[in-house]
Image (tube, rainbow, N blue to C red):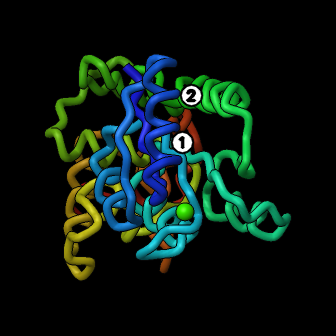
Amino acid sequence: MTRVLVVEDQPRVASFLKQGLEAAGYTTEIAGEGKTAIDLASTGDYDLMLLDIGLPDMDGFQVLADVRTVNTDIKVIVLTARGEVASRVRGLDLGADDYLPKPFDFDELLARMRAQLRARRQPAASLLAAGDLELDLKERRARRGESAVDLTSREFALLEFLLRHAGQVVSRAQLLNGVWGYDYDPRSNVVDVYVGYLRTKLDRLGEPSVIETVRGGGYRLVAGSKPGASLSRPPSGSGA
Ligand code: CA
């Protein structure tokens, strides 16, 4: 079941969209305000968001920016009367996946939604892997090479987040937002503590850690250190 969040303050437009989307088989929820949209998107219950830029309580671009800090997974199609190139570029910069100027053809909207949802299914496959690290999202199981690794649900969520951003630097703030929820105290060292737990469970003696600390930045998953890779630094997380 695909769930769509319609962020639109005009009741007529919102109910037109809802009717059309439900006729097309989508489960649809309407948010008439930016704040509500962010709250709903942060639940992770929605696959796709249709976002109107002109909202009563806040700018749709701000909504988009806030949603991206709590949910990198949801597909976002911006619907707006502001058809200018500038807002299009801005929307895509802020993490919109697509952009459709109003008025639009409903069939075109459905086609664009299908394209985004197809694209979403690839990274949302039940198996995430990087190097010899594997996460089975359906079975909630983790492996490194031949060994199963027993993770708590929080460790699992943290590793999932890192795997989805494998090779990229992820800041502590992003990890706090993505794994613990955006209202978590940002002064907390909980991220570092849990990265330590993961290293203890995943790292191999004499090899660099699969989770690299990036000075001043955050962390980067560099999983899949090949056997025999040269040691540039001592292994982290071994309690030393
Ligand atoms: Ca509006």
Tell me which residue sits at (61%, 31%) in the image.
113
Res. 203 in view: no
Name the image quarter holding the C terminus: bottom left
- The residue carrying pointer 1 sits among few (fewer than 14), some (14 to 19) or many (20 or more) residues within 10 Å by Cα, namely many
Q: Give the x, y percent position of residue 235.
A: 38, 55
Q: Quadrant of residue 238?
A: bottom left
Tell me which residue sits at (25%, 60%) in the image.
181
Mark closer to the chain start, 2 or 1: 1
Q: Are marks 2 and 1 in contact (CB under 8 Å)?
A: yes
**Secondary-structure class at tag 2:** helix
User: In the rendered view, would you say 24 is above or below 184?
Assistant: above
Nearest the eye: 16 or 183: 16
Q: Is residue 18 left or right of residue 61?
A: left
Q: Is residue 201 left or right of residue 25?
A: left
Name the residue tied to disc 2: 117
Name the residue tied to disc 1: 75
- Most distant residue in the front direction: 12
- Most distant residue in the right direction: 85
User: In the rendered view, would you say 72 is above or below 185?
Assistant: above
Tell me which residue sits at (44%, 60%) in the image.
67
Is the CB atom of the residue marked by disc 1 within 8 angstroms of ligand 1's nearest atom?
no
Name the image quarter holding the N terminus: top left
Q: Is residue 193 left or right of residue 58?
A: left
How far apart marks 2 and 1 lie (CA) works out to: 7 Å
Nearest the eye: 93 or 216: 93
Q: Give the x, y percent position of residue 89.
A: 78, 63
Tell me which residue sits at (38%, 64%) in the image.
33
- Most distant residue in the left direction: 152
Dividing the image into four quarters, tell me where ligand 1 lies.
bottom right
